Image (cartoon, grey):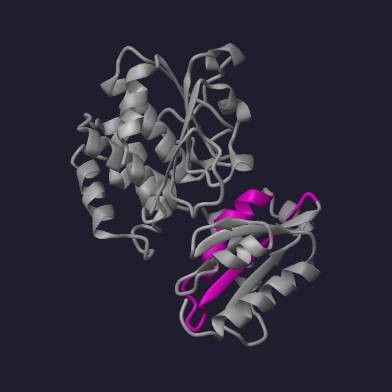
């Protein structure tokens, strides 16, 4: 599957690695993991990672992005990782590279690079990078393994989501053989301070069930977010799965007001919610997708669509 990647790496001296904006653990895990793999296996190459700040993932080694001048893209190979749509790429200068390659596990939406390696059967883009390393017989060091393992564990929900497969666990085992410090990693990912727990209690108190259906939701206004001292993206991504384990709830949705619109994160344990996210201008995975809606009226139309979905047989 990765023959063209290996061939391209043999041809270009400069490699610039992109991923989606507002990165999660998988976007950074894939990006930093691939960068470390190339440095370890192709020591003569110049390797750069670019994009917006790492946010809460600054604990990851190498997470400070490089400042790359425009002329660095001349004759360079650019990767775009963990990104399902061109408008989501952090730093659109990837288009200026001599050759572009995308490696992604989202449901296919569009073609926007020269080489497209898209496989939604993988739990994470980091898992795809690990598979690339295994297929090519590359050396995997502790640095590359820790980055990729972080991406795999976060995007698989600690290996709980049904995207987790025997391949996932085989690759994770390969990475763990490099002495990944899981104790420190899990503390960084999942420990919470007292104030964060208090904020979580506020969010839990806001959970509602839509029309006595199997759909749960929360709506956070910009004013409420400011009062909590948080940013909209952290609330949107960081609180949706508070609703993940409610008995009798098949779909859960988080609406977060941001810059005149509502960010919408949709999750499910049993239903394919992606078509509904696409209907409202978004996308993602079968059971984890997102979009933006302009107002609460549209938000409730989306909830009604999800209610109908939960009342149908099958996914």
Q: Is residue 237 positioned above or below 87 on the image?
A: below
What residue sits 51% from the left and 77% below the top?
250
Q: Residue 252 occupies which quadrant of the picture?
A: bottom right
Q: Residue at x 21, y 48 (%)?
A: 173
Residue 261 lies left or right of residue 94; in this view the side is right
Q: How many marks?
A: 0
Residue 295 in the image: x percent, y percent?
Answer: 80, 63
Residue 201 appears in the rendering: no
Taking the image as shown, residue 233 lies to the left or right of residue 300, namely left
Give the camera-side residue of 59 and 252: 252
297 shown above or below 221 = below
Quadrant location of the N terminus in the rendered image: top left
Front residue (pair 283, 114) = 114
- From the viewer's perspective, tell me whether residue 76 is left or right of residue 169: right
For residue 6, which quarter of the picture? top left
Is residue 246 within the magenta segment?
yes
Residue nearer the viewer, 89 or 300: 89
In magenta stretch: residue 44 = no
* Residue shown at the point (66%, 69%) measured from the top left: 218
Q: Is residue 183 above or below residue 102?
A: below
Tell me the quarter of the picture where residue 185 sits: top left
Where's residue 48, x and y in %? Answer: 46, 21
Name which residue lies at 36% across and 53% down. Answer: 122
Q: Does the rendering let one see residue 51?
A: yes
Q: Residue 38: x percent and y percent?
A: 33, 24
Residue 270 position (above or below residue 43): below
The stretch of residues the image draws in magenta is 232-259
């Amino acid at each position: 599957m990765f023959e063209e990647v290996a061939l391209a790496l043999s041809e270009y001296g400069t490699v610039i690695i992109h991923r989606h904006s507002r990165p999660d653990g998988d976007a950074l895990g894939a990006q930093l993991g691939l960068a470390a793999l190339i440095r370890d296996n192709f020591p003569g190459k110049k390797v750069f990672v670019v994009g917006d700040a790492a946010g809460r993932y600054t604990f990851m080694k190498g997470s400070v992005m490089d400042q790359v001048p425009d002329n660095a893209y001349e004759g360079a190979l650019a990767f775009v990782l963990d990104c399902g749509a061109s408008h989501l790429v952090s730093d659109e200068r990837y288009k200026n590279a001599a050759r572009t390659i995308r490696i992604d596990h989202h449901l296919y939406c569009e073609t926007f690079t020269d080489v497209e390696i898209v496989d939604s059967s993988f739990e994470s883009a980091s898992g795809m990078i690990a598979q690339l390393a295994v297929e090519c017989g590359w050396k995997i060091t502790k640095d590359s393994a820790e980055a990729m393992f972080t991406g795999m564990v976060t995007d698989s929900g600690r290996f709980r989501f049904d995207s987790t497969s025997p391949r996932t666990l085989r690759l994770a085992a390969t990475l763990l053989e490099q002495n990944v410090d899981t104790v420190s990693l899990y503390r960084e990912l999942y420990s919470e301070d007292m104030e964060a727990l208090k904020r979580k209690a506020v969010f839990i108190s806001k959970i509602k069930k839509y029309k006595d259906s199997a759909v749960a939701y929360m709506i956070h206004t910009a004013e409420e977010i400011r009062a909590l001292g948080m940013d909209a993206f952290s609330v949107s991504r960081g609180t949706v799965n508070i609703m993940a384990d409610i008995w009798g709830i098949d779909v859960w949705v988080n609406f977060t007001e941001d810059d005149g619109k509502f960010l919408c994160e949709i999750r499910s344990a049993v239903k394919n919610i992606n078509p509904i996210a696409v209907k409202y201008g978004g996308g993602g995975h079968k059971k984890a997708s997102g979009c933006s809606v302009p107002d609460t009226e549209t938000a409730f139309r989306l909830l009604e669509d999800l209610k109908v979905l939960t009342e149908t047989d099958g996914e």
